[in-house]
Image (tube, rainbow, N blue to C red):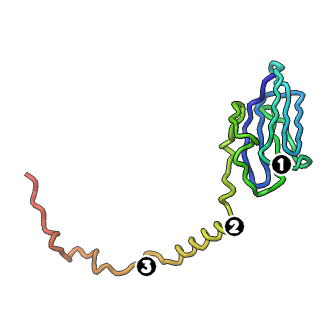
């Protein structure tokens, strides 16, 4: 028996765990208030996988679900306290060799506050109201070829 490789990511109201076991059979997922248990048989060679996770925070075990696909088992864990970020999946800070962060699905949702989005809209409006090329000041005939500065003298040819 060995643990299944797993990836996880955090969302505002949930945590998603993907147990990467192809052709899994006899899948069992148990959700407890502070734990998640997973076990299955890998279909190709009947190797038994089992994982037990002491979760970082509490979950609503009655609202949690899982879905088996041909390549993995996805687990949706609803947070007991939505809006609170989980810096890690496990209660303990120990690094588990079979667990990693799913950076392809990770999103820093904490930074997406309504206030910041409103501030960006205000900034965008301000930039749009500053005017375009028609509002540029006259640069005293800078485009006139006839105006000459002291440093606009003809350069001697190179020998």
Side (left or right) of 151 relative to 144: left
Residue 20, percent from left and from top: 76, 32
Q: Nearer the viewer, residue 3 or 27?
A: 3
In the picture, the disc for residue 134 is 3
Locate the N terminus and report the quarter of the image it occupies.
top right
Q: Nearer the viewer, residue 53 or 69?
A: 53
Side (left or right) of 28 relative to 6: right
In the picture, the disc for residue 58 is 1
Q: Callout 3: 10 Å neighbours few (<14), some, many (20+)?
A: few
Residue 24, percent from left and from top: 83, 28
* Rendered residue at 61%/70% (across/down): 119
Q: Quadrant of residue 102?
A: top right
Residue occupied by mark 2: 114
Q: Quadrant of residue 7?
A: top right
Q: Nearer the viewer, residue 86 or 113?
A: 86
State how far apart marks 1 and 2 are (Cα): 26 Å
Side (left or right) of 157 relative to 20: left
State how far apart marks 2 and 3 are (Cα): 34 Å
State how far apart marks 1 and 3 are (Cα): 59 Å
Residue at disc 2, secondary structure? helix
Mark 1–mark 3 CB contact (< 8 Å): no
Above or below, comparing residue 18 to residue 149 in the picture: above
Of circles 1 and 2, the one toward us is: 1
């Amino acid at each position: 028996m060995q643990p299944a490789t797993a990836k996880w990511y955090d969302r505002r109201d949930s945590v998603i765990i993907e147990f990467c076991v192809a052709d899994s059979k006899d899948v069992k997922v148990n959700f407890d208030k502070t734990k998640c248990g997973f076990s299955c048989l890998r279909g190709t060679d009947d190797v038994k996988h089992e994982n037990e996770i002491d979760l970082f925070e509490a979950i609503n075990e009655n609202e949690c679900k899982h879905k088996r696909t041909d390549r993995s088992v996805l687990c949706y864990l609803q947070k007991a306290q939505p809006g609170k970020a989980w810096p890690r999946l496990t209660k303990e800070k120990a690094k588990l060799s079979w667990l990693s962060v799913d950076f392809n699905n990770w999103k820093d949702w904490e930074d997406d506050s309504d206030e910041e989005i409103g501030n960006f809209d205000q900034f965008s409006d301000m930039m749009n109201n500053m005017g375009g090329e028609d509002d540029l000041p006259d640069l005293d005939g800078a485009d006139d070829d006839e105006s000459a500065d002291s440093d606009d003298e003809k350069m001697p040819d190179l020998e």
